[in-house]
Image (tube, rainbow, N blue to C red):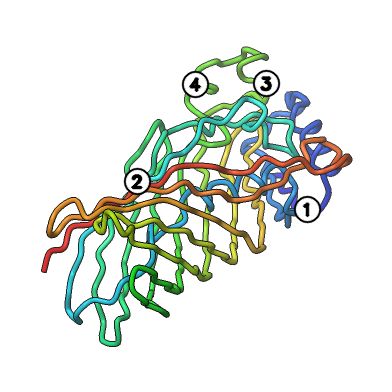
Amino acid sequence: MRHFTQAFRSPLAALVRAFVLLLPLQATPSPAQPVIAFREQLERERPEAWAMRWFAGALLPSGVGAAEGAPAGRIELGLEVGSLPHLTAEQQTVGFAGTKREELNRSPVAARLAATLALPGDASVTLGWVPPVEAEGVAADLVSLRLARPLLDRGRFRLSAALLAQRGGLEGDITCDAATVAAGADPVRNPYRCEARSSDELRLELWGGELAAAYRLAGAPRWQLHAAAAAFRLEAEMRVDARYNGLRDRSVLAFEGWQWVYSAGASVAAAERLRLGGEVAYSPLEVIRDPLGRGPARDDSLVHLRLRLVWRWR
């Protein structure tokens, strides 16, 4: 088996790699497929890194409001739903430094189950889980932990802080999806000659903090307005496992860096034990879509909706 191991660190190198992969490999039969195995550390403006940061922001756990003090032992069960905005063809062209289109529109939403336990000292801990429900060949599986406590509670105004961490990712046929493979030798629908559905894995690990403020309306005390800012350190890896053009690609693309998410919304006590909340979240993102990495970075930020339903069990 021929085994290629390289460390690419520039868009130009990625383009050279893409050109080589498009060349037909039919000159010499081989008992096993050649393997490409390399690790590349991405700059934050690279299209591949932009996609990783986009999904990290969209899947970030949120309190959808400011934490409240509660008697120790109280348990709340929650369901959180976040929208995954539809990406254009240009936004999905993130492979090989922004020259290969990936099918990233798999589901319009992501759902998280959550359980919150009130601790002594007005603190609370929330365990969240995005279960691995498959959506068109891709499934997310993430576990999150959130420790929150109010810092200030004065009349209708409340200020809280939270520490958060999340680990997990997405698995599926991202590099070579089912529709592309089904296209066979069609050079337009299958330009990289995908031979089988890939088994790729996007790993997302993060930790950070959030500061949130809430204000209870005087004329409608069941309603609260809130705003929050979160900062988190992201460590992301795209682990490719794809077969195309006579090759097997086992490359790893990695990104590390800080990211911000800002949100604002409202919540209402719909019943004695039930609270509903919603917010708009914004994560500033920049990307350079020039395949050579030249030119100014463009704003391509994430804006999406998050909804939360909380039922007090006891």
User: What is the distance, in whole Å, between disc 2 and disc 3 at their CAs?
Assistant: 36 Å
Q: Which mark is residue 179?
A: 4
The image position of residue 33, as x and y in percent, is 63, 37
In front: 235, or 120? Answer: 120
**Distance of label 4 from label 2 (alpha carbons):** 28 Å
* Label 1 packing within 10 angstroms: few (<14), some (14-19), many (20+): few
Seen from the viewer's position, the closer of residues 190 and 164 is 164
**Mark 3: which secondary structure?**
loop
Circle 3 sits on which residue? 191
- Callout 1: SS: strand
Quadrant in which residue 222 is drawn: bottom left
Q: Upstream in the sequence, badge 4 or badge 1?
A: 1
Labels 4 & 1 near each other (Cβ < 8 A): no
- Which comes before the other along the chain, label 2 or label 3? 2
Alpha carbons under labels 1 and 2: distance apart: 40 Å
Query: Which one is nearer the viewer's eye here, 209 or 160?
Result: 160
**Percent from the top left, x then y, of residue 177?**
51, 29
Q: Which residue is mark 1?
A: 6
| CA gap, disc 3 and disc 1 | 24 Å
The residue beneath circle 2 is 81
The image position of residue 98, as x and y in percent, is 73, 35
Image height of 101 relative to 314, above or below = above
Q: Amino acid at mark 3?
A: Pro
Residue type, mark 2 in image:
Val
Q: Earlier in the sequence, mark 3 or mark 1?
A: 1
